[in-house]
Amino acid sequence: MNGIKILTVLRKELTAGLRHRAASASMLMFALTALACMSLALGGSPLEPNVLAALLWIVIFFASTVGLDRIFEDEAASGTLTTLKVYADAQSILFGKMIYALISLSALSTFLLPTFIVLFDCPVAEPPVMLLTIVFGLIGLSGAGTLVAALSTAASVKSGLFSILLFPIVLPIFLPAINLTSAAMAGGEISLTMLIPMLLFDAILLVASSILFDYIWN
Amino acid sequence: MRIVLEGVRLAFGRAVLFDGLTATFESGRTTAIVGANGAGKSTLLKLAGQFLEPDAGSIKAFDGDRELLHAELRRRTAALAPTMNLYDRLTATENLRFFAGLRDVTVDDLDGLFARVGLTAEDEKKLVVEYSTGMKQRLKFAIVLAVGADLWLLDEPGANLDEAGRSMMLKEIARAVGERKLVLLATNDPSEEAAADDLIRL
Ligand SMILES: Nc1ncnc2c1ncn2[C@@H]1O[C@H](COP(=O)(O)OP(=O)(O)O)[C@@H](O)[C@H]1O
Ligand SMILES: [Mg+2]
């Protein structure tokens, strides 16, 4: 693995992604539609923090599946995957694409989070915990998403299966993420040490992806 | 570099493509692989580059007496094939720099490299989606030249090229062989077949 090659991959993803915004546009459209539906259906009635937290993560999860399932599928469809396999080593591709996924999801959340807070009149008692929870959640989601995207493309699984495959892998991150987000909204007994399990699972996920990806790529 | 195939067998389903195939390819030589459509030329290139594993038999790459690890061989391989596409939404230069960058190569003389494959300075800045098939073929070949690999797997390199393009390709192949590169050529073009040192007819 080498940092410069990871940056090479990241730069290419950013350039191509900015010129052809289909993936980010569909993520954004999904998030917008979901927010609008929920907001209209609820008509301003107040929700408990745990319900709000679950709703937020459901929107993040499904919005991400709309964009992340294309990570390798687009390359396979356009025939660039074969060229990439000749010239690129597995780890540069994995981490380059993973960082790009994280950047896309962060951009999405930068839009999603304030909108969500305003629309649902959502309290935020502990902003730092809330932010870190979302960052750690997105890291796990990008890592798992990139791996599952590679697996489903390698196995030529139809993309509908992407979210079904992704869900069990990110569940150990989502459950603490929902609890922590809810606690960060409500305030009270909460400390940054509660983020450690999420951080650990992120680390395990990244190491496991890195090991598995060599087999998927070659 | 030397690539040794011994008793290679490969079948797709019930169709047996190779059985008991034995061959040796050496640095400083071009081997042309010829045969009808579907004879297995492209598949043989993939086997030689270890992009595909045989069902039986062995395929090994050596540097002197030392067997090359899979990752080492990959780093020393460049390839060109009709199924290998470039990024339509990147410019020619961005494509070239990207693939070269994946091999830790920075291209200094961009104009020179483009000129070598018959592309102009104006072509450098064009998006690949605006390229003709022949221009794409030239750009793919520029990538092969840029990465400085020891093993060249060229699948129908003359495809879609005009007369000048084909003679440029043959000249570059001859030069590469002079630099002790190992060139495998899957082709149906008589002039490419004639330019090779060895021939495998499938
Ligand atoms: N991945 C594959 N799955 C099934 N059959 C394949 C696959 N790749 C090649 N083949 C079959 O192997 C034969 C040889 O293919 P190929 O090497 O591409 O031929 P050539 O390059 O000589 O035209 C063809 O009959 C083709 O259908
Ligand atoms: Mg072929």
Image (spheres, coloured by chain):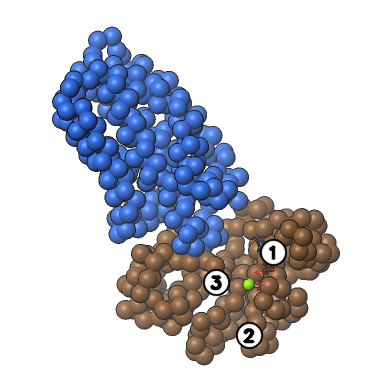
Chain colours: A blue, B brown
Q: Specify the subunit that label 1 lies on.
A: B
Q: Answer with mark 3 or mark 2, whichever residue precedes in sequence.
A: 3
**Chain at tag 2:** B
Local crowd size for mark 1, using a 10 Å CA cut-off: few (<14), some (14–19), many (≥20): many
The residue that mark 2 highlights is: B189
Q: Position of residue B176 (x, y in %)?
A: 59, 76
Q: Earlier in the sequence, mark 2 or mark 1?
A: 1
- What is the three-letter code of the residue carrying label 3? Pro
Mark 3 or mark 1, which has the lower sequence index? Answer: 1
Q: Are marks 2 and 1 on the same chain?
A: yes
Three-letter code for the amino acid on which mark 2 is drawn:
Asp
Q: Residue at label 1?
A: B48
> What element does badge 2 sit on?
loop
Q: Quadrant of residue B97?
A: bottom left
**Residue B75 percent coordinates (x, y):** 58, 58
B60 or B112: nearer the eye?
B60
Name the residue located 49 percent from the left edge and 30 percent from the top edge: A168
Disc 3 and disc 1 on one polypeptide chain: yes
Q: Position of residue A107 (x, y in %)?
A: 27, 42
Q: Is residue B85 among the parts visible in the rendering?
A: yes
Q: Quadrant of the N terminus of chain B?
A: bottom right
Residue A3 appearing in the image? no
Q: Tell me, for residue B82, which label it has, or none.
A: 3
